[in-house]
Amino acid sequence: MSSFSGSAATLRSRGWSLQLSGYLLLLPALSFLLLFTHYPALATLWQSLFSAARASHPAHFVGLDNYRALLNDDIFMQSLWNNLLYALITIPLAVTLALLMALAVNRRLRGNALVRAAFFIPSLLPMIAIANLWLFFYTPQLGILNSLLAWFSLPAINWLGEPDTTLYCLMAVSVWREAGFFMIFYLAALQQIDPRLSEAAAIEGASRGYFFRRVQWPLLLPTTLFVLINASMNAFRIVDQVIAMTNGGPNNSSSLLLFYIYRTAFSFWDMPAASAMTVVLLVILGSIALIKFHLLDKRAHYQ
Amino acid sequence: MKAASSPGGFALNLLIWLAALLWSLPMLVALWIAIHPAAGQGTFRCWRR
């Protein structure tokens, strides 16, 4: 009996030491995660509950006043709406184009490397260079789009100077930039699919569309989930493109959420308001990730 | 699967090539402006110094 309890104690102590070594191995990564990710998020949340410190008025606790002020901030509401519209249009477009591109370059094609490069290079270019390239299209006097309109005797449009067109012009640039990047993930996933499946489908006489719908698409769902989450995060993280192309104008029609946060924090120096907006942005991104993981993960097929 | 040598396969390949050309149009336009003496109007003036 005593030898049995002794061996149980030995097993328990070995389990504890295993757990301890596990936590010690986790410690370096965990400490960096806590220090550089979770602590700033909590500090932002805490700062959003205080008023802005001014020379004669030190910051004091105001509760949810900064959040209430956001509801009355027309520019914030417009930026939020612009960003939602931007996400709703660019994400499906970029992901669909990425999938089509991947399917296109996955087939036997002469000069395949060149076609892949043509699709992928835009995602390698820095944002300022991309903005400069697209200004050749959108510039009112010299731009290619207006030259094309002139060929058909149509009136010129100030693409980046009119509130109705500016946001859509930014969307086009984003889709052009991101689709090639997401294509790489789809291409990698397509090349992971066992070639015997396509051979079997060919023998059975399955059409290309049927093979895609019943075999390739279910196997691509984990990649789609990953790409969708990345695309959603990118849609709410965009700021450099807005600064380079429109600076939020005209009349805030191209102001996006992160751009407005940046301007509030570093042009107006209203850190608590910027913190409150950041918390709203974090909630939006967290909700998107949760919804996608819960809904799509159930339908994803992992090989 | 349709072979690339069949007429349908050739048309699809041609379509893919046209799409790739269209996709790289912004970069080709920039290249054209960079090397064309009249276009650009100073955008790439530093190259000519």
Image (tube, helix red, strand yellow):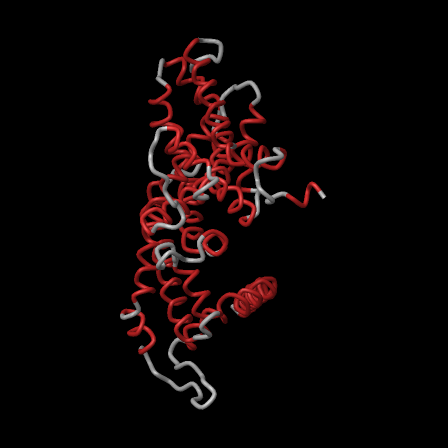
**Exactly how many numbered labels are in the figure?**
0
Taking A283 as reference, is A183 left or right? right
Instruction: Give the residue displayed 39% in from the left and 81% down from the top.
Output: A50
Q: Report the residue at 36% width, 13% height from top.
A: A205
Residue situated furthest top in the rendering = B6
The quadrant the C terminus of chain A occupies is top left
Residue closest to the far bottom: A56
Visible in this render: residue A7?
Answer: no
Q: Is residue B45 visible?
A: yes
Image x and y of residue A220, in percent: 41, 35
Percent position of residue A151, x then y: 39, 29
Question: Looking at the image, which is closer to me, A201 or A42?
Answer: A42
Q: Position of residue B13 (x, y in %)?
A: 47, 18
The quadrant holding residue A45 is bottom left
Above or below A35: residue A216: above
Quick one: which residue is furthest to the right in this view?
B49
Q: Is residue A158 left or right of residue A40?
A: left
Q: Is residue A96 above or below residue A297?
A: above
Residue nearest the observer in this picture, A281 or A37 = A281
Instruction: Identify the residue at image location x=59%, y=44%.
Output: B43
Vertical arrangement, residue A152 with respect to residue A278, above or below: above
Frontmost residue, A262 versus A231? A262
Left or right: A158, with A135 as reference point: left
Q: x, y percentage for residue B23? A: 48, 32
- Residue closest to the eye, A264 or A48: A264
